[in-house]
Image (cartoon, grey):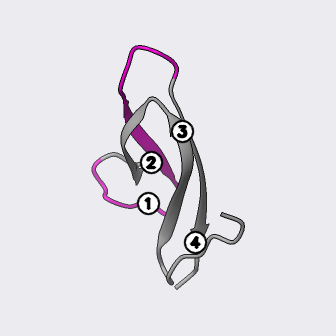
């Protein structure tokens, strides 16, 4: 993804690849808030007891 985009007021995360990762999702850095102006993090489940990683890019457009 060379030009990631997002609608106004939204963060869009584009997962480009990874290994040993399932159920990838973006969540707030402030637990229980559903959203945060301070950032986000990616979480996922490891399929096997081995190294795991996700490659991704993101975009945000101000409202």
Q: Nearer the viewer, mark 3 or mark 1?
A: 3
Residue located 54% across and 39% down the image? 18
Q: Which residue is mark 2?
A: 29
| Gap between marks 4 and 3 measured at Cα | 22 Å
Q: Which residue is mark 1?
A: 36
Label 3, secondary structure: give it.
Answer: strand
Q: Position of residue 9 (x, y in %)?
A: 48, 79
**Farthest residue in the left direction?**
32
Please tell me which residue lies in front, 41 or 49: 49
Q: Position of residue 46 (x, y in %)?
A: 38, 27
Whether residue 38 appears in this view of the structure is no
Mark 1 in CB contact with mark 2 (< 8 angstroms)? yes
Please tell me which residue lies in front, 6 or 37: 6
| Gap between marks 2 and 4 measured at Cα | 16 Å
**Farthest residue in the top direction?**
49
Categorize mark 3 by other alpha carbons within 10 Å: few (<14), some (14-19), many (20+).
Answer: few
Name the N-terminal-most of marks 3 and 2.
3
């Amino acid at each position: 993804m060379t030009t990631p985009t997002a609608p106004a007021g939204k963060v869009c995360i584009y997962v480009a690849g990874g290994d040993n990762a399932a159920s990838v999702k973006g969540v707030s850095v402030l637990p229980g808030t559903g959203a945060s102006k301070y950032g986000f993090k990616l979480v996922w489940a490891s399929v096997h007891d081995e190294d795991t990683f996700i490659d991704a890019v993101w975009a945000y457009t101000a409202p």
